[in-house]
Amino acid sequence: MPFTLPGSRVVITGAGRGIGRALAQRFAAEGARLALNDLDGDACHEVADELGAIALPGDAASAAGAQTLVSQAASALGGIDLFCANAGIEVGGAETDDAWQRSWDVNVMSHVRAFRALAPAWLTRGEGRFVATVSAAGLLMMPGAAAYSATKHAALAHAEWLSATYGDRGITVQVVCPLGVRTDMVRLDTPHGAVVLGPTLIEPAEVADAVVAGMADDRFLILPHPQVRDYYLARATDTDRWLAGMRRVQAAIDARDD
């Protein structure tokens, strides 16, 4: 049976701004019932109040936070039909262990921990949908952002594994992989942001539109920027040529640094 948003029970992390907020607005317009999460409690409550949703602020990346979010949302909504693992961070060129660990926790382990909490009820029901905001960096890479690239690749691999493992048991898994989106995370005042993402910027609402379209046919890859499919194909079929192209992009970034 195709997934329908009206009346569905939806949890969105990172819902205080950007893509998460746009998803919340679009889903609410479609008649979904929402529980919203963000580390920024004020932003979370602002969006929830705007949409008549439930605000459940907190750190969804931690083991305790993920379990609490799923438990509280399921109790408030009477169950969870769709979980949007949307929270993410990008630490730029920071190479400290702390930056890598936080990237790992937010961009990967928040997905692992959320699904771990969701799976028992979904497997019992034989139904559930997990949509992860992975970014095109998970399919390709992001020059100037090593931790972001590596952890988004890991998030993609985790989602692929979930789909292969649970797809025939009623659980649908999808990933959202945009290029540049006009959010606070995209820093056009940095060389890598300006060179890589600046020319590709779309609005968060366009990502939300793509997600709704993607859920209509259960496709695994939701690509708000259609050209990402071609880039992904080029990466797979001629990796050396693709890497040479990425080195040219890096050279353009370095030139802006000079």
Image (cartoon, helix red, strand yellow):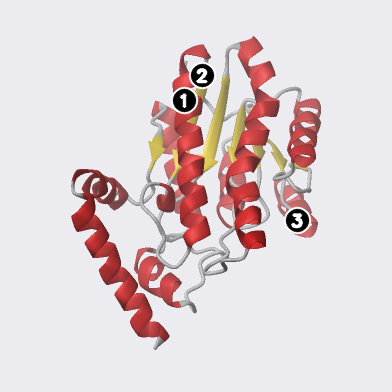
Q: Which mark is residue 46?
A: 3
Q: 10 Å neighbourhood of mark 2: few (<14), some, or many (≥20)?
A: some
Which residue carries the number 1 mark? 163
Compared with 26, 181 (above or below) is below
Q: Is residue 217 visible?
A: yes
At label 3, counting other C-alpha atoms closer than 10 Å, the crowd grade (few under 14, some 14-19, many 20 or more) is some
Q: Which mark is residue 166?
A: 2
- Judged from the image, the secondary structure of the residue bearing numbered disc 1 is helix
Question: Residue 13: which quarter of the image?
Answer: top right
Q: Are marks 1 and 3 in contact (CB under 8 Å)?
A: no
Q: Earlier in the sequence, mark 1 or mark 3?
A: 3
Instruction: Give residue 10's position: percent from left, percent from top.
Output: 65, 33
Amino acid residing under circle 3: Glu
What count of labels does the image hold? 3
* Separation of residues labelled 2 and 3 (CA atoms): 35 Å
Image x and y of residue 228, in percent: 31, 50
Q: Are marks 1 and 2 in contact (CB under 8 Å)?
A: yes
Say which mark, if any, is on residue 14. Answer: none
- Residue 111 location in percent, x, y? 61, 38
Q: For numbered disc 2, what is the local secondary structure?
A: helix
In percent of width and height, residue 150 lies at: 48, 52
Quadrant that contains the C terminus: bottom left
Q: Circle 3 — which element?
A: helix
Residue 165 or residue 210, whichever sits in front: 165
Q: CA distance from mark 1 to mark 3?
A: 34 Å
